Amino acid sequence: MDDKELKKFIHDNKSLFWYTPEEKLDGIDHEAIVETILNYGNWESVLKLFDLMGIKKVTEIFFKSINSCDRRKNNYNELTINYFTIVFNRYAS
């Protein structure tokens, strides 16, 4: 995974990271990137995330996040959890 490309991806989608000051965009961790893109991104940005991080890594982060505690799970939209659970169980197992 190329950090330079990931940072460009974050900046290209900075409207989705509205809660982060622009000078701190480069410091967003992978968990927040996956959560934001899966919750609010369009299909093109989801596919780009898979391309940059790999579907296996995105899957790992997603399941770790939704299984770690209720607070983290509640950061995901209920429909997002349902949809990507189905997608990842089918295509990333």
Image: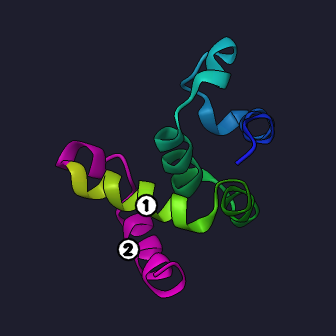
Residue 87 lies left or right of residue 2; in this view the side is left
- How much space separates mark 1 and mark 2, taking CA atoms? 16 Å
In the displayed image of the protein, which residue is found farthest to the front? 1
Identify the image quadrant of the C terminus: bottom left
Q: Is residue 61 magenta?
A: no
Residue at the image point whose x is 30% and y is 56% from the top = 66
Residue 58 lies left or right of residue 21; in this view the side is left
Q: Amino acid at mark 2?
A: Asn
Q: Secondary structure at mark 1?
A: helix
Q: Which mark is residue 6?
A: none
Residue at the image point whose x is 42% and y is 82% from the top = 89
Residue 34 in picture, x, y percent from top left: 53, 50
Residue at the image point whose x is 79% and y is 34% from the top = 4
Front residue (pair 77, 23): 23
Sequence-wise, which precedes: disc 1 or disc 2?
1
Q: Amino acid at mark 1?
A: Glu
Task: Relative to 41, say whether 18 is above or below.
Answer: above
Q: How many marks?
A: 2
Residue 54 in picture, x, y percent from top left: 64, 62
Over which residues does the magenta segment extend? 69-93
* Few, some or many residues within 10 Å of mark 1 (<14, 14–19, 20+): few
Task: Relative to 60, say whether 4 is above or below.
Answer: above
Residue, disc 1: 60
Please tell me in which quadrant of the rendered image residue 26 appears. top right
Residue at the image point whose x is 51% and y is 54% from the top = 39
Residue 4 lies left or right of residue 69; in this view the side is right
Magenta segment's dominant SS is helix
Residue, disc 2: 82
Residue 12 lies left or right of residue 21; in this view the side is right
Q: Secondary structure at mark 2?
A: helix
Residue 8 in picture, x, y percent from top left: 81, 36
Residue 30 in picture, x, y percent from top left: 53, 41
